[in-house]
Image (cartoon, coloured by chain):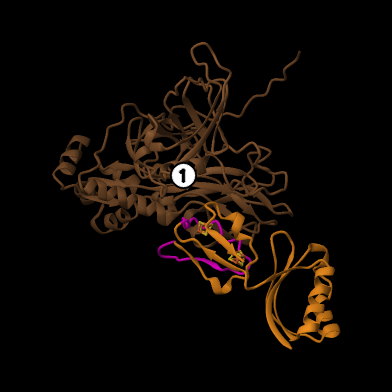
Chain colours: A orange, B brown
């Protein structure tokens, strides 16, 4: 059975320069698409991948990643903003690694572009009124 | 031309007062000129909405039967400790207070999801709060234990009393170290990764009255959605700092202590704040009206973000070590552009104080005045001015020798 999934990989600092994705291709015959790659303030590597391949191989590939110490989140994890609680302070703007928050130059309201969100979770504890919520 | 507060209040009563917020007035005066504007406009409204430490509230919860003396014992509101060292049933709750079992920074950075500021928000939202107390028992106050729900509507008094709010200017916080730090100015990324500032700039009350000509003790204000008053100068009041040509302090300067009836207030304008790695606090909405008594008072309200500069401070070293070093000065216009230059590097900026909400507050206050619901007051006493010599001082530690 074929699978096609989007996942978020978080690499601890020590692993940032290891050829993880290469192994996925070579050993598990998975096809990949890098949707986003960045380094978070904690100096972790953050990679959003679309992975395609055979279900069995996919599962083995994921197991390999977990064993190697990579944290995996599914992109179906959904981060939303509680509009009632958001005060438009702006504290999240420079926190988000993908730039999902933008200040409207006219109204100075903070716009949340959820299609850019990779559910990394960094804005959740950084938002003072706890307006950013994660749903599983 | 000179107006008096009494004349302005007459116009408010008649529904004829001309009121602008501190953003609109800039444009209006640009078109009409200062002289005409000072004649035509009666009030300029300001606003600010940000996390303000040194906020808190006091309550009288009413006597129990049999009586209990909370003073000298321990009292908790939703597990957050309240200060009881006042009397039998008077309490003070500080916005920064944390439950005893909060992990704090044991796992760094702590999340600080619930504290005094959140209890204040829930109280004004009309939610029931768990009050739990233990006392030592006296002949006249025999009871030793109390566990009950309380609600703001049943309290004898619920008074917000913030001893330092509405800072006139504030630091821009950055981090030059090589690791992320978690400060009350937010998450600061390493190597000048971001710069956080915290003021509504041209809308902020004390920027529009930099020499405290109209704002003083007794000034009626918008506080947390209700009306309140300036009670005193705020703590750490520091009016004698360097100023720009137009008189704007170039660093944190004046502050206000404010007081008001919490029963009138709303959770829209008092919001519990969780500051990662730092603690809990309260986001407070304040609006101050400025009576346009003459051209000079008006001129100060025309301040723009480009006129206001703030110091850039390294929160990985200069701030915690109490060093006077500054990495530079930037204007609020630059800060609001989204990036500033520090040591030749482009650094993205973020605000901690909400400009849209500050504007909303200034507009609500404007509507109250236009509808004849809010009248202006003359201060009963002036705040110490820039020439007063009042200065904030560090603690001079003197070793205690046994
Ligand atoms: S930090 Fe939270 S409250 Fe502030 S703008 Fe972002 S989502 Fe809104
Ligand atoms: S979880 Fe928050 S910080 Fe992370 S990508 Fe989504 S919006 Fe940005």
Location of residue B257 by image quarter: top left
- Residue B360 can be seen, yes or no: yes
* The N terminus of chain B: image quadrant: top left
Location of residue B307 in the rendering, given as x and y in whole percent from the top left corner = 43, 51
Answer whether residue B146 is magenta in the image.
no
The residue singled out by tag 1 in the image is B122
Task: Tell which residue pokes out farthest to the front in this image.
Answer: B66
Q: Which residues are magenta?
A: A85-108
Q: Nearer the viewer, residue B356 or B85?
A: B85
Position of residue A54 relative to residue B14, above or below, is: below
Q: Nearer the viewer, residue B84 or A112?
A: B84
Answer whether residue A102 is magenta in the image.
yes
State the residue at coordinates (46%, 54%): B354
Task: Tell which residue pokes out farthest to the right in this image.
Answer: A27
State the residue at coordinates (40%, 40%): B210
Give neighbour class at mark 1: few <14, some 14-19, many 20+ (Cα, 10 Å): many
Position of residue A74 relative to residue B195, above or below, is: below
- Residue B243 can be seen, yes or no: no
Mark 1 lies on a secondary structure that is helix
Location of residue B230 in the rendering, given as x and y in whole percent from the top left corner = 37, 33
Taking the image as shown, residue B176 lies to the left or right of residue B255, namely: right
Q: Main secondary structure of the magenta part?
A: loop
Location of residue B137 by image quarter: top right
Position of residue B209 relative to residue B327, above or below, is: above
Q: Nearer the viewer, residue B276 or B330?
A: B276
* The C terminus of chain B: image quadrant: top right
The chain under label 1 reads B
């Amino acid at each position: 059975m074929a699978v096609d999934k989007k996942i978020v990989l978080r690499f601890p600092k020590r692993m940032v320069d290891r050829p993880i994705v290469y192994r996925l291709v070579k050993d598990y015959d998975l096809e990949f698409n890098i949707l986003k790659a960045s380094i978070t303030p904690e100096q972790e590597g953050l990679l959003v991948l679309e992975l395609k391949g055979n279900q069995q191989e996919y599962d083995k590939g994921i197991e390999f990643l977990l064993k190697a110490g990579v944290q995996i989140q599914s992109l179906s994890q959904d981060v939303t903003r509680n509009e009632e609680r958001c005060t438009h302070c702006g504290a999240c703007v420079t926190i988000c690694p993908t730039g999902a928050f933008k200040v409207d130059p006219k109204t100075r309201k903070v716009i949340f572009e959820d299609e850019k969100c990779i559910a990394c979770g960094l804005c959740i504890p950084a938002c003072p009124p706890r307006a950013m919520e994660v749903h599983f | 031309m000179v107006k008096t507060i009494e004349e302005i209040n007459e116009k408010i009563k008649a529904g004829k007062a001309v009121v602008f917020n501190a953003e609109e007035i800039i444009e209006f005066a640009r078109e009409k000129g200062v002289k005409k504007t000072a004649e035509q406009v009666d009030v300029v409204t300001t606003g600010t909405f940000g996390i303000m430490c040194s906020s808190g509230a006091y309550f009288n919860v009413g006597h129990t039967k049999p009586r209990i003396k909370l003073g000298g014992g321990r009292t908790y509101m939703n597990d957050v400790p309240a200060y009881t060292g006042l009397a039998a049933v008077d309490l003070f709750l500080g916005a920064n207070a944390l439950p005893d079992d909060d992990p704090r920074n044991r796992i760094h950075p702590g999340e600080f999801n619930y504290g005094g500021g959140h209890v204040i928000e829930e109280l004004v939202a009309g939610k029931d709060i768990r009050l739990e107390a233990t006392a030592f028992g006296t002949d006249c106050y025999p009871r030793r234990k109390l566990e009950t729900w309380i609600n703001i509507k049943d309290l004898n008094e619920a008074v917000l009393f913030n001893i330092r709010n509405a800072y006139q200017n504030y630091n821009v916080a950055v981090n030059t170290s090589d690791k992320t730090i978690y400060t009350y100015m937010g998450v600061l990324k390493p190597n000048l990764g971001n710069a956080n500032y915290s003021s509504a700039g041209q809308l902020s009350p004390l920027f529009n009255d930099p020499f405290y000509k109209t704002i003083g003790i007794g000034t009626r204000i918008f506080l947390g959605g209700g009306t309140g008053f300036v009670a005193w100068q705020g703590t750490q009041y520091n009016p004698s700092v360097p100023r720009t040509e137009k008189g704007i302090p170039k660093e944190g300067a004046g502050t206000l202590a404010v007081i008001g009836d919490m029963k009138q207030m709303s959770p829209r304008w008092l919001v519990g704040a969780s500051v990662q790695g730092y603690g809990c606090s309260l986001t407070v909405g304040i609006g101050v009206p400025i009576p346009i008594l003459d051209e000079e008072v008006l001129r100060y309200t025309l301040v723009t973000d480009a006129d206001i500069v703030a110091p850039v401070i390294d929160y990985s070293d200069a701030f915690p070590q109490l060093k006077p070093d500054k990495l530079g000065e930037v204007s609020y216009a630059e800060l609001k552009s989204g990036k500033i230059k520090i040591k030749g590097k482009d650094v993205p900026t973020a605000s901690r104080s909400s400009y849209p909400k500050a504007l909303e507050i200034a507009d609500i206050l404007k509507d109250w005045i236009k509808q004849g619901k809010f009248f202006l007051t003359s201060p009963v006493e002036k705040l110490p001015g820039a020439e007063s010599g009042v200065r904030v001082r560090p603690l001079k530690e003197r070793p205690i020798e046994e």
